[in-house]
Amino acid sequence: MALPNLLLVLVAATAIYLVKGTDLKETKLSLYLQDISAFGAANATAVPVAGIAGKDWTFTQFGTLYVTDDNITETPDRNSARVGQAQGMYVTAGLDGLNSHVMVSIVFTNKEYNGSTIQLQGISKQFEAVREVSVVAGTGKFRFARGYATFETYFLDIPAQYSVIRCNVTVQHY
């Protein structure tokens, strides 16, 4: 008698899960990160905070840890409407200096998604034209998020140490 009851519970749980799965939404976002890597500048948004003693703390030096708090805007223009912040860290994780491990939260401050977040994580092949990382979580309107994000360098001004990074996010959430 216990086996049929267990089977009934499993069938009911599966049915509820399948019905709930129909509530899954997909959102595609195109965001622009305004990155200022001018170490020591008052307006820097990405700075190295740790590295190997006796080595330069650079984007290509294995073990260099950066902390970032980039403004996110609707368009590539740094004066366009602000959507939120890209807050987190990345570390040069490849011995050859080609890969960095990214752990960034997109923290929304705009009207539509205010207070919600999307968590990004993964290896970024920093010298490739398009770098892809995983969407591993989210909060608020992006609760139970999963998906992927790509980064593309849209604009680069090496003397000013300023760049605009386009971040295209495809996220599934409830």
Image: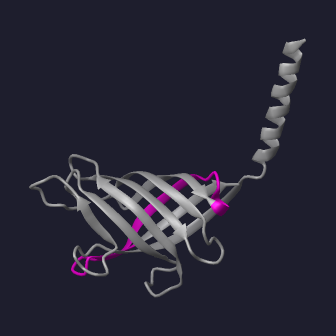
Left or right of residue 10: residue 97: left
Residue sitting farthest toward the bottom? 79
Indicate the quadrant containing the N terminus: top left, top right, bottom left or bottom right.
Answer: top right
Residue sitting farthest toward the right? 1
Residue placed most toward the observer, 5 or 80: 5
Q: Position of residue 4 (x, y in %)?
A: 88, 16
Q: Position of residue 120 (x, y in %)?
A: 48, 56
Q: Residue at x 46, y 88 (%)?
A: 79
Q: Position of residue 75 (x, y in %)?
A: 50, 80
Q: Position of residue 45 (x, y in %)?
A: 34, 73
Indicate the quadrant containing the C terminus: top left, top right, bottom left or bottom right.
Answer: bottom right
Q: Quadrant of residue 27?
A: bottom right
Left or right of residue 55: residue 138: right
Main structural element of the magenta stretch: helix, strand or loop?
strand
Residue sitting farthest toward the top? 1
Left or right of residue 34: residue 138: right
Q: Quadrant of residue 114?
A: bottom right
Q: Is residue 40 magenta?
A: no
Q: Residue at x 88, y 20 (%)?
A: 5
Q: Which color scheme did the rendering employ for the protein?
A: one colour
Q: Residue at x 60, y 65 (%)?
A: 116
- Reply above or below: 69 against 120: below
- Reply above or below: 116 against 63: below
Q: How many marks?
A: 0
Point out the stretch of residues depicted in magenta: 140-164
Q: Is residue 159 magenta?
A: yes
Residue sitting farthest toward the left? 54
